[in-house]
Image: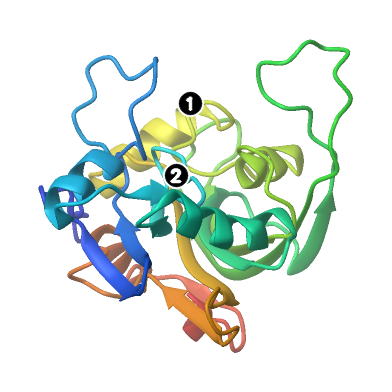
Amino acid sequence: MTELAQGTNGSALTVLWREGDWLAIHKPAGWLVHRTGLDAGETRFVVQTLRDQLGQHVFPVHRLDKGTSGVLLMGLSPQAAREMAQQFAQRQVHKRYLAMVRGWPGASLSVDHPLRPDDTPPETPPQDALTHVRRLATWQLDVPVDRYPHTRVALVEAQPETGRRHQIRRHLKHIAHPIIGDATHGKGAHNRWWAQHLGLQRLWLHATELRLQHPADGRELLLRSDPRDAALNPDWCALLAQPWVWERDAHTAA
């Protein structure tokens, strides 16, 4: 089996698209978007690295978790970032993610499960949250990781219609198919086994695609971080080369 590479975590970040006061980059797994009060020991921050790389300030339009890789939008001014962020707030951005999950979920399902914001009192009312999930491929190994005689994983496409924090991770846990490598919402035994088996410990969640309108002229933008790009996403590229059983017409969706 091919051991998975550690990914593009060098000093330079890949710019996927740049026009006017907006740009999209590929965020590697393991990078924080910006410094926070909980970043003790962290050294890789998108905002600071990109600022030094471009020689000007940058402003995040949205966020990706530290462990998530993929497409991240930035503005070159606060106003530019706000103009794009409005589309996220108004649910006009179509987002696609790729995830490897424990078990085999149904071929297609929608998870309509309200979520209470993290770190809020128990009496805080939950907010509506909706994620569409489609199974792309399955893989079974005849190795007992827990009480079952084999271990199963699946590749799924997740399309969130809302943007709650950790929504995809929490929704996949809710349907009992947590993401492999999710230390908060996943299963420790499976995370450890797959990390050893694949030679890489990471959260297997990738923001593959954003579809939205250009703030300046309204034309459609399709921004993508291709998981099959060996230079950009070597870990995903190696994972997708494993002996998956693909659903009909699903192989190109990843």
Q: Report the front residue among 126 and 15.
A: 15
Q: Which residue is mark 2?
A: 143
Mark 2 Cα shell of 10 Å, populated few (<14), some (14-19), many (≥20) = few
Q: Disc 2 marks which amino acid?
A: Val
Q: Which residue is mark 1?
A: 188
Which quadrant of the figure contains the N terminus? bottom left
Which dot marks residue 249? none
**Residue 83 % position (x, y):** 57, 61
Vertical comparison of 57 with 88: above or below? above
Vertical comparison of 202 with 231: above or below? above
Q: Earlier in the sequence, mark 1 or mark 2?
A: 2
Snapshot colouring = rainbow
**Residue 249 % position (x, y):** 59, 89
Left or right relative to 150: residue 48:
left
Q: Report the front residue among 34 and 216.
A: 216
Q: Disc 1 marks which amino acid?
A: Gly
**Residue 182 % position (x, y):** 49, 35
- Residue 134's quadrant in the figure? bottom right
Left or right relative to 82: residue 177:
right
Label 1: which secondary element? helix
Work out how far the residue at label 1 is from the one at label 2, CA to CA, in angstroms.
16 Å
- Residue 228's quadrant in the figure? bottom left
- Residue 133's quadrant in the figure? bottom right
Label 2: which secondary element? loop
